[in-house]
Amino acid sequence: MLRDTPRTSSYLAAIEQGAEEYFKGKFVMDVGAGSGILSLAAARAGARRVYAVEASGMVTLLSQVISANGFDEIISVCACPVENLEFPLDESDSKVDVIVSEWMGFYLLHESMLDSVLFARDKFLKPEGLLFPSTATISLSVASLPEAWDEAVDWVSKPFCGFDLSALHGPLLQKALAEPAIRTVKTEELFAEPKSIFTLDLTTLKVEELSHLHTQTTVKCVADGTLHAYVLWFDVYFPGKDALVCLSTAPWHPETHWKQSVVWFGKEAPAVAGLNLGVEVYLRQNERNKRRYDISLEISDAWHAEEGVGAEAGAQSSEGAGGAAGFSG
Amino acid sequence: MLRDTPRTSSYLAAIEQGAEEYFKGKFVMDVGAGSGILSLAAARAGARRVYAVEASGMVTLLSQVISANGFDEIISVCACPVENLEFPLDESDSKVDVIVSEWMGFYLLHESMLDSVLFARDKFLKPEGLLFPSTATISLSVASLPEAWDEAVDWVSKPFCGFDLSALHGPLLQKALAEPAIRTVKTEELFAEPKSIFTLDLTTLKVEELSHLHTQTTVKCVADGTLHAYVLWFDVYFPGKDALVCLSTAPWHPETHWKQSVVWFGKEAPAVAGLNLGVEVYLRQNERNKRRYDISLEISDAWHAEEGVGAEAGAQSSEGAGGAAGFSG
């Protein structure tokens, strides 16, 4: 994922731009450091000390990468989950000035480490400390994806090589609705004005607020056509007094490994230019695995309610009681 | 995979072409029937009876598909592994005239059901019976894949955003060599004349011959350049007195879900137009999981031996003792 250029370059640009003001001489924590690129960037930006917290088997490599770049004196590897971290690690520091972390998952929250980042913020960040990134948004639109819908489900509704395979429709539909499809959606496939549906201020967001996100919104259709799916993506923003640095996974920006998240309606629905579609969105954190979310989206206005359009896509833990398969994207 | 057009259309063309001669009034067995497309095709071609053998949970759907197409009287679903099948199922039949099966895996043998098809052949096929397909070949070439190699491993050999990440080279190389990469190779990326290295006559092939396939061959470079990998693919051929029907997964044919199998050298190597490269190929069936293979390819001529080029790609069972990860492609 280091090779995901929009991802890595956004972080590095934000850290470099904030070097003088936010990093020079400061204490920094990198939550989920991985191969250490953000720790290295913070060290290069002049941090006095960087705590690279990494719980996985990556720690050996992480230490090698740090040494190879001559930052052994600056970056301390903490080989444990941040929840188990004992701090301060030496006499010179109490809490940190900055937390950097690349914690985002599909549609922002799926498999994300945000809980861990908020834990680290509450326990280890100075009151006036900064988070990189500091704000996140989830956005929504609807899309016309006839080919993808046909490929996923609809082809079995039609004769195939002269045979009737419609018995397969139910299982294919069930599979398609069980979890969002992670795929690249083209801007021209969006049939409604994009709408930001959740804005998370990471400096004040409470862990318990993550357990159940809910909103009602409307999206305005911009063209006539046939709709197949909701499309979700996210943006994160970094602190900065100069140019605002953003990492965007919107369809009109360069592709990232997060692509976009497609939640199928389950059937085709008409789009009419100018029509406002009411949409109700639920993101429910799985109780047993906080890194998993169930997502459901429903057209909530009467016009579409009559059509019976609505999707529930469970991106559930494989431990979950529900029948939906684990999210493997 | 039904939607893999080259795959499905080859089978259907072969069955339709052979309808009069091979299928009309005959007893047919479909080993691993899945959703039943080959059973349907055999029934439509005039088979007297088709035994659709399917061990997975697909059997309910399979029965529904058969009913929807009006072939309940012709196609009998056998819900068990073919190894457990009791036969004859009724008084009218002893053995079958034709076995159809889509059993192929990556580079033909990986995760394939060929063992089961040969078992069915030996137990249930009449001496003069036919297999669809009846012959299979595995072919080899070498390729220049600078971008893919860079993306997989080589990028960490160079400075990345000003940092030295070369400590990651070992783990990335290990990962790349652990299993073949399933990817689309373009014809123009091939730097040697394609060479058929194994030809399996399925009518005579013995199960025990599958445990260890070995060959030494030479491939002739057609251009100067830099080589990165061996490329493997397969073709299968169907019986037919008219046009020979072939399902080919070669790079110059329409893409299938099998794509091509890329086995990295582990380093770059020079290609010189006209040079013959000696290559030694081993395909060893995993003892505990017959559907898994370890594959190794080595440049065997002295010129390259000096260069130390050679790759061992283990596509091993997750049950295996080896350190290589299971093949998830």
Image: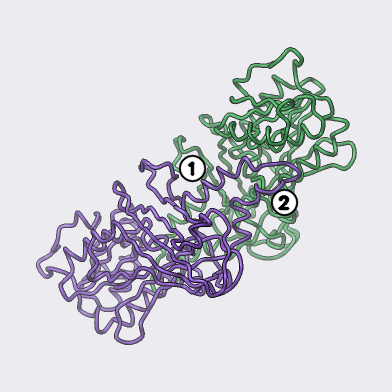
Chain colours: A purple, B green
Q: Mark 2 lies on which chain?
A: B
> First in sequence: mark 1 or mark 2?
2
Q: Find disc 2 in the rendering and name its residue.
A: B250
In the rendered image, which quarter is residue A18 located in? bottom left
Residue A251 is labelled as: none
Residue B197 point in image, percent of width and height: 72, 43
Q: Is residue B283 above or below residue B233?
A: above
Toward the top, the furthest residue is: B91
Residue closest to the eye, B307 or B250 = B250
Tell me how many marks there are.
2
Q: Which amino acid does label 1 sit on?
A: Gly
Could you say whether the residue bearing mark 2 is in a helix, strand or loop? Answer: loop
Q: Can residue B100 be seen in this view?
A: yes
Q: Which chain carries label 1?
A: B
Q: In this view, does A128 lie above or below B292?
A: below
The residue lying at 37 percent from left, 79 percent from top is A245
In the rendered image, which quarter is residue A97 located in? bottom left
Check disc 1: other Cα within 10 Å, few if <14, some if 14-19, many if 20+: some
In the rendered image, which quarter is residue A70 located in? bottom left
Toward the right, the furthest residue is: B242
Q: In this view, does A203 lie above or below B16?
A: below
Q: Horizontal placement of A219 versus A90: left or right? A: right
Q: Do labels 1 and 2 share a chain?
A: yes
The residue lying at 76 percent from left, 24 percent from top is B49
Check disc 2: other Cα within 10 Å, few if <14, some if 14-19, many if 20+: many
Q: Horizontal placement of A131 versus A259: left or right? A: left
Residue A45 point in image, percent of width and height: 29, 78
Alpha-carbon distance for marks 1 and 2?
25 Å
Q: Can residue A264 be seen in this view?
A: no
Residue closest to the eye, B64 or B207 = B64
Q: Find disc 1 in the rendering and name its residue.
A: B326
